[in-house]
Amino acid sequence: MNNVRVFKMSFASVYPHYIHKVEKKGRTKEELDTVIFWLTGYDKKSLQQVIDQKTDLETFFAEAPQINPNVSKITGVICGYRIEDIEDKLMQQIRYMDKLVDELAKGKAMEKILR
């Protein structure tokens, strides 16, 4: 998939898929939000603004209050790519979020997800 196309996707269009994925595996929207807050520094109010404004993923990460300094501890493979080897910083951040959502859906303990 073309990276530019991914970067221009709105967070609001991706978020319901994340919710569905984690709820289908017995986790909650609140747990998902906790993971997203940890990664980006957004809070409930600012995340809702991102959703309401249909902010694209590029802007979502560019305007994130604070990307967690422990993101480098997120390693492994997502969508066939080793996260730590992704050179494009924005794509790497998107994949960090995907990986955290996957870990949540797979039942990993919150303490381990929030490194």
Image: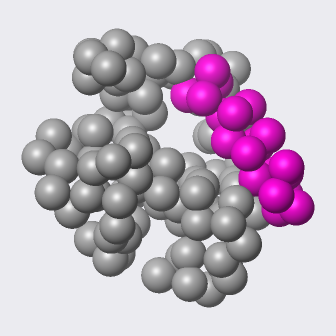
Left or right: residue 30 versus residue 38 is right
The residue lying at 26 percent from left, 58 percent from top is: 82
Question: Does the magenta-highlighted stretch encompass residue 76?
Answer: no
Residue 52 found in image quarter: top right
Residue sitting nearer the eye, 98 or 53: 98
Q: Would you say the magenta stretch is mainly helix, strand or loop?
A: helix
Left or right: residue 15 versus residue 73 is right
Q: Residue 51: x percent and y percent?
A: 66, 26
Q: Residue 83: x percent and y percent?
A: 28, 57
**For residue 88, above or below residue 11:** below
**For residue 4, above or below residue 51:** above
The residue lying at 34 percent from left, 67 percent from top is: 76
The residue lying at 32 percent from left, 77 percent from top is: 73
Left or right: residue 17 versus residue 79 is right
Quadrant where the N terminus is found in the figure: top left
Residue 6 found in image quarter: top left
The residue lying at 68 percent from left, 42 percent from top is: 18
Q: Residue 9: x percent and y percent?
A: 47, 18
Q: Say how the picture is coloured.
A: one colour
Question: Does the magenta-highlighted stretch encompass residue 21?
Answer: yes
Segment tinted magenta in the rendering:
11-29
Number of numbered discs on residues: 0
